[in-house]
Image (spheres, rainbow, N blue to C red):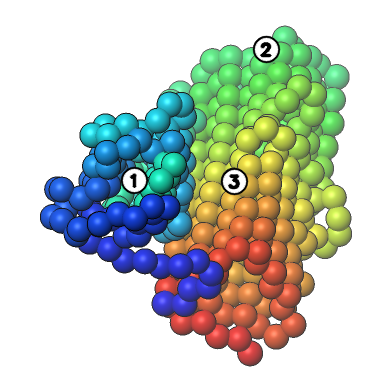
Amino acid sequence: MLAGGGLLSVGVSGAFDTVRMTRPFDLAVRRDDEALLRIQLFDSTVESGTTISMIELTNGFSSAFETVTVDVVSSGGLDVDVETPLPTGTFSPRQRLPVIATVSCNGDRTETVVLDIVAEGETERVEARRSVEITCLGTPGQTISACSLEPTGDETTASVFGSQSTDTIAGTYNVSLSGAGRVLGDVDVSGSVDATGGSRIDGDVTAGGVVTLSGGANVGGSITTGNSLEIANGGTLGGSPASLEVCADLLLGGGSNLETTSVIVGGTLSNTALSGQGRGLSTTESGITVGGDLEFGGGAVVESVADVRVGGSVVWNADVLRTSGDLLVTGDLVVGQGARLDINGDIIVDGSVTINGNQFVATGDLTVGGDLTVGPGSAVDVDGTVTVDGSSSSY
């Protein structure tokens, strides 16, 4: 294991690691249950997005602590958000103080979470490092509401073409739009939706089958499908803020340049590898969640205002992947020649990372569960700690 940065201190579970005094004090080492700061650890199983009590602190000193902090050193790819243990008041003698955290994950996984604990008063300071094991249950594909949508098998075709228009389409239909055909409101059907040419849907699309936009077709609202979504050859989203929720795969083709509030994909998120700019995907409110693989090439740009979570692997051969949050990958991460990653947060990869002649930037930590390989000509800039559980090599 390769680790960069940080100081690792190991102590007996439940006792204290380091005590600093500003006055003389005869400190005796006692049994764990009589220690001055007792730290009780809880190995937990939690559903993604819910809270747990990770540890409990007991003040064995005769005086109060004024501040208590608990920071996550490493989490193995889990997203662990620790609440402030002592938001107000003091940590009094003999008081018990639970430490609560919200845990999120891409898929079912068990990880070791390392915590730095500091309690400080007027005359005492206690520092400790502890590890707890957390099992997080949560697979994106199982929690996507769109996956409850599916065709009935009894669909008939509803067509809007030429200069025709209709207010809404709802029911047991497969929808076909072409030419200048227009739906002024929502489309909510059990079957598929195929929109081509200059056709337009002004509202939201909800479908149990495959949704396809091509040839300049436009959807003004959100798209939710129990199957796959393909947006190709100039298909666009526009109008009101829109989200994408796709149970299966999302494929972006040439000319697609989508701005959405959020993206949730149960399968693979990919594009057709075309050169040139202006082909990509961006979010304005939330992050991007992908249950399968993330595969992009060509001149595509993908930008997220929050975390990008990938349940499979990432193969990035496109222009740039840019986030204002973390990049969390359950599988491997491969960054191809000339491609760029610009991550304003941590990069946490359970598998291996391969960087081939490209720009690789992270303002936070880089944590690699497998091997790290850096190819010639690669510019790697990581502001935080680099931790590699496997081998590390460059050539």
Res 250 → quadrant: top right
Q: Position of residue 40 (x, y in %)?
A: 23, 46
Q: Furthest-bottom residue in view? A: 395
Dot 2, crowdedness within 10 Å: few (<14), some or many (≥20)?
Answer: some
Q: Are marks 1 and 3 in contact (CB under 8 Å)?
A: no
Q: Of label 2 and label 1, which has the lower sequence position?
A: 1
Q: Is residue 174 left or right of residue 149?
A: right
Q: Amino acid at mark 1?
A: Cys
Q: Position of residue 187 (x, y in %)?
A: 64, 19
Q: Is residue 345 above or below residue 214?
A: below
According to the image, label 2 marks what residue?
168
Label placed on residue 307: 3
Between the residue at mark 2 and the residue at mark 1, the CA separation in whole angstroms equals 42 Å
According to the image, label 1 marks what residue?
136
Front in this rendered view, residue 128 or 161: 128
Q: Is residue 374 left or right of residue 379?
A: left
Q: Say which element carries label 1.
A: strand
